[in-house]
Image: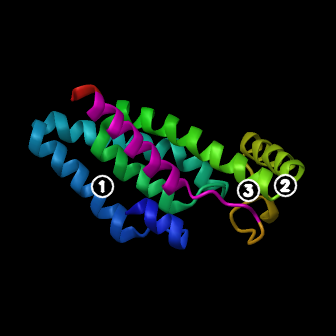
Amino acid sequence: MAGFTDWRWRRIPNWLTVPGLVLGVAANAATDGWVGAKTALLGAGLGLALLLPLVMVRSLGAGDWKLTGALGAFLGPQRLIAVLMGTILVAGLMALVLIVAKKRVRKTARNIWHLLVTLVRFHMPARDVSLDNPESLKVPFGVAMAVTVIALAVGHMARIG
């Protein structure tokens, strides 16, 4: 559902992420007791902590950030890392296709450099190299995450069956 809403409206709503986090903790607690609750909270915290710097410099949306926390609550820290690595790969491929299709390779390289400098200096990026710029190319991170979760789940099911 998050992938669909991100694709369609470029938003991942709170009504999806907040109950998702609570449900992830509850499901893990119900199946594994306190150990499950701890694993869920560690997964949620890890997802939120890892992506917070990207939200702070406005290169990732808050909905994507909250979705990662909710997914971390379901998966725990170890599985979340696998999903994030796959999501980065899928999002990177999506971005590459978009950048080449829109003929914005040089401008994108310059913007990436500015964002990296911003992260090192702990400053907010210029408005033209953040999500605040209406002309910037945006990859729906929720879609990349949904594709990754589905691909990993199908791969897991194929190994079991």
Residue 101: assigned label: none
Q: Earlier in the sequence, mark 2 or mark 1?
A: 1
Give the Cα separation between the discs numbered 2 and 1: 37 Å
- Label 2 neighbourhood size at 10 Å, few (<14), some (14-19), many (20+)? some
Q: Amino acid at mark 3?
A: Met
Q: Is residue 93 magenta?
A: no
**Range drawn in magenta:** 136-158
Give the Cα separation between the discs numbered 1 and 3: 29 Å
- Left or right of 123: which side holds 40? left
Image quarter of the N terminus: bottom left
- Left or right of 103: which side holds 82? left
Question: Could you tell me which secondary element the residue under label 2 belongs to?
Answer: loop
Q: Earlier in the sequence, mark 1 or mark 3?
A: 1
Location of residue 2 with respect to 68 vertically, above or below:
below
The residue pinned by badge 3 equals 124
Q: Amino acid at mark 2?
A: Arg
Query: Closer to the camera: disc 2 or disc 3?
Result: 2
x, y (%) of residue 16?
Answer: 34, 66
The residue pinned by badge 1 equals 21
Q: Amino acid at mark 1?
A: Leu
Question: Could you tell me which secondary element the residue under label 3 belongs to?
Answer: loop
x, y (%) of residue 87?
Answer: 52, 42
The residue pinned by badge 2 equals 104
Tell me the residue at 52%/61% (across/down).
62
Q: Earlier in the sequence, mark 2 or mark 3?
A: 2
Tell me the residue at 55%/54% (across/down).
141
Give the Cα separation between the discs numbered 2 and 3: 23 Å
